[in-house]
Image (tube, rainbow, N blue to C red):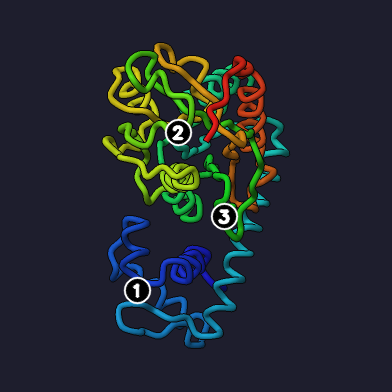
Amino acid sequence: MLNLHRLFLLRELSRLETMSAIAREHSLSPSAVSQQLSQLEREAKVTLFEQSGRRVSLTDAGVRLARRAEELLGLVETAEAELVSARGEAGGVLRVASFQTPLIVLAPVAVSVLEQRHPRMRIEIAQREVEAAYEGLLAHRFDVILGEDYPGGQQVVRRGTDREELLRDPLLLVLPDHGPASEVRRLADLAEMPWALDPEGTRTGAWERTYLRAAGVEPWVRFDTPDPLLQVHLVRSGHAVAFVPGLIAAEHLGGTRVLRLLGDPHRGLYTAARAGAREHPSLLAFRAALLEAAEALGDLPDLDELPA
């Protein structure tokens, strides 16, 4: 019988393409990974992979077995979820990865709900950007992640995962409440102002620059940071202007001037888990608590719209 752990490593080889990448991802030595996969090949009695430079290419048989391994791993997770359901209560450890703004606003409420309703459940949350969170989810380091999509960007859907929409979050402009920037009436008036933007290679940073350039503004990025609270602090102190998600607008934008953007752009927030675990009681409880936290958010006040 083929070993489940070795099948998992073969699935990881199809995803990561090198033995050293698998070793880094799972805190193993490259030699240990190589030995386990070689043993799987002997058990299968067929060639599963071939060395191609630093990368390893799966043979046709290896590709087919890696796909079956993914299906089998999903079935094992489904069986585990069914056993937990039979015991009748969410429990154990749920490992979550999320980017910053849901951690600031939604996670505290969700954790409080879970502590009250599911005392046998323990939740552990790590801050990760979406790409790193997905890698950890597929590597089984996390059980569920929070992600985001931006207008005009490609929706992120990974094979073998179950995605559930959480909320639509308006994207806003935040200006100092004093000084020249506080007096602007159009987005084009901000062409000479210093900006605090997310790094260009991120989804947020790419959307911000695309939106500004579409309005004829080539931003002067004085502060390059992915931290929205730091961006707001820099705006409040009069040193920058920035975009912010509506999720943090209610409690964290005091001392600033907040405006809606032309076209009312929104980002989409979602959760993603491995498909085999979609009915796990702890995952269902977490998603329900997050939705409750999202529904408890107050409506944004009426805001002026800043034309392009």
Q: Quadrant of the N terminus?
A: bottom right
Sort mark 2 into few (<14), some (14-19) or many (20+) by Cα contacts within 10 Å: some
Give the image quarter of residue 300.
top right
Upstream in the sequence, badge 2 or badge 1? 1
Q: Amino acid at mark 3?
A: Gln
Q: Amino acid at mark 1?
A: Ser
Give above or below for 80 relative to 62.
Answer: above
Q: Which mark is residue 125?
A: 2
Question: In the displayed structure, does residue 238 sit left or right of residue 210?
Answer: left
Residue at image mark 1: 34
Q: CA distance from mark 2 to mark 3?
A: 26 Å
Upstream in the sequence, badge 2 or badge 3? 2
Q: Amino acid at mark 2?
A: Ile
Q: CA distance from mark 1 to mark 3?
A: 36 Å
Question: Quick one: 308 or 210, which is closer to the camera?
Answer: 308
Residue at image mark 3: 154
> Mark 1–mark 3 contact, CB under 8 Å?
no
Q: CA distance from mark 2 to mark 1?
A: 32 Å
Would residue 150 be seen by someone viewing this image from the given angle?
A: yes
Q: Position of residue 26 (x, y in %)?
A: 37, 56
Question: Quick one: 74 or 248, which is closer to the camera?
Answer: 248
Give the image quarter of residue 83.
top right
Circle 1 sits in a helix, a strand or a loop, which is it? helix
- Write the residue at 48% across / 71% down: 14
